Image (cartoon, rainbow, N blue to C red):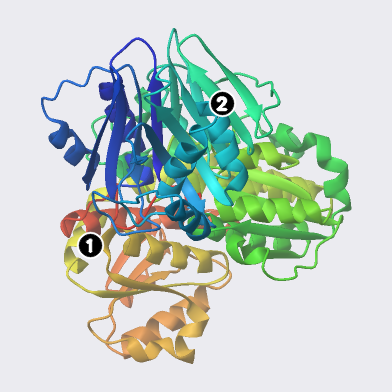
Amino acid sequence: MCGIVGYIGNKKACPILLEGLRQLEYRGYDSAGLSVIDGERLRTIKSVGRVQELENKIGERNISGEIGIAHTRWATHGKPSDKNSHPHNDCQNNISVVHNGIIENYRELKEFLIKKKHKFSSETDSEVVAHLVEEFNKKVDFKTAVLEALKLIKGTYGLAIISSREPDKIIVARNGSPLVLGIGKGEYIIASDTSAIVRHTDKVIYFDDGEVAEIKKDGFTVTNIKNKSVKKDVTILDWTVERTQKEGFDHFMLKEIFEQPEAILDSIRGRYISAKGAAKLGGIENVIARIREAEKIMIVACGTARLAGMVGACMLEEYAGIATEVDYAHEFRYRKSVIDEKTVLIAISQSGETADTLAAVREAKEKGALTLGIVNVVGSTIARETDAGVYTHSGPEIAVASTKAFTSQLAVMALITVLFGRQRQMSLVTGQRIIKELERIPSKIKQILAEDKEILKIAKKYHKYKNFAYLGRKYNHPIAFEGAIKLKELTYLHAEGFASGEMKHGPIAMIDENFPCVFVAPSDSVYEKNFSGIQEIKARKGKVIAIATRGDKEIAKVADDVIYIPKTLEMLTPILAVIPLQLFAYHMAVLNKKDVDKPRNLAKSVTVE
């Protein structure tokens, strides 16, 4: 979603704000802007497009203030334009606001403010915040005005607000949209996430919903909306600046694809006991008794994370023998799910801030379920609000399209399956076999990555086609959907994922020589079914790219192109099968001259419903 940066200290704010926006641009890049208190005046500059456009607009202007806020936008209310860009100011150009979230009652508030003679200049919901604070600020001080405004606002928000009348502070507030405070030496940095902070400090505070902070050069205070003091703990970040750089790769996405062997090692290291065929997950040890009594598992997530959940559901049902459902997080709380204290809800989210997934967690807790989180970002909201959980430890993922976060989620789901399974009917030998194969996965991914040039050759052969079908079965049914999503995200080409058994029930009508199919068909328990599906496609003159197990010579006789992956356990094949699909989508995007790291209309973390 949108990215927020704020700075107060002894340095020029403008360069720090711009650098922070560049780090957060993956959260939104429809427009960008900043406001700096320069002397006694508020200077606001905004531009449609990428952060670079804002930098070009600022040019050689000398903006010397040491306090400011900035924003990179992913549009919700109001099309991308200069007037709809953030920051938004009040009528007198004294108060400036940046906002991430949605003000649900903005129409009502806007009507109220218009009657008070306020003049609006944008189509956004966010602008009402600036005018609301201005209205209250006529009678009370700046912070009290913000508190009074927040009492009227319904919806989600991450807010940073400054006023040229009280130029020594930034007021920030959170409800549903993440905000982090970086604590430096004589300076503070506010941001939507830590990627904009790590180059300045490793000490941060994560704000919780309902909290408001007043930040000055010499310190800060945190209260709730009723202005009662709140004590906060400092977290030390384990991410470095270097881990967020491209390190010689052309794109962050390619770098993150090639980081997957290390990422999976980091996800599983120290979390299993090979001799016992057991998983040791410290983050959920305190709820083991409730897990043992569980009768049902619900997995909730959105997008790629939900597909990781679908693979996990196959693992859990086959190896742990426990009924498992997967739901879209954004649908979960709008239907009457049958859950109780015997239900375990697993929420999967790379950022740990996905609004719909967080809402599902809160709904499940309300109904008595045990909630577990699988997240990447330490200290994120889902990590804090679930009863227990597992960090994937896959490191910062900057590219909008998820790669290493996805495969790390699959690795963690395999460990959770062993944990649940060994409490039930899973044998020692089975547990040992899964752990042994999981240990080998990183080296097998390296073997696939070594074939990158061959995958590029295949992409060159197909990059001008406009339609693709991706097909898979059982464990690789979700991987077919993931392959299609990656191609859609990166190239904007039409791609659809199907359970391969569904093809003959309608979708095969689309197939001809101009509609290639990508078949995920490793040598597993459903190989013969997939092989038949490939023959059906070929009988309709369709072209087939097959993802197959190394040594399978038969599939090369029917498929037009084959990308081989090493052999592994069936339940772990999705981790390997998705790697060539990621590389194929990447190369297709580059060949079609698309912006790989920042696809249009997308944002990395969806923090509004």
x, y (%) of residue 179? Answer: 51, 34
- Please name the residue that numbered disc 1 is placed on: 458
Residue 499 shows which numbered tag? Answer: none
Q: Position of residue 187 (x, y in %)?
A: 42, 13
Q: CA distance from mark 1 to mark 2?
A: 54 Å
Q: Residue furthest left?
A: 60
The quadrant where residue 518 appears: bottom left
Badge 1 marks a residue whose secondary structure is helix
Can you say whether 222 is above or below 397 in the image?
A: above
Mark 1 belongs to which amino acid? Ile
Q: Position of residue 536 (x, y in %)?
A: 39, 87
User: Could you say which quadrant of the image residue 462 lies in?
Assistant: bottom left
Residue marked by disc 2: 213
Callout 2: SS: strand
Q: Residue at x 39, y 13 (%)?
A: 9
Quarter of the view holding residue 299 = bottom right
Residue in front for this viewpoint, 106 or 445: 106
Residue 22 visible, this angle = no
At x 23% / y 31%, what residue is drawn? Answer: 248
Q: Residue at x 34, y 29 (%)?
A: 20
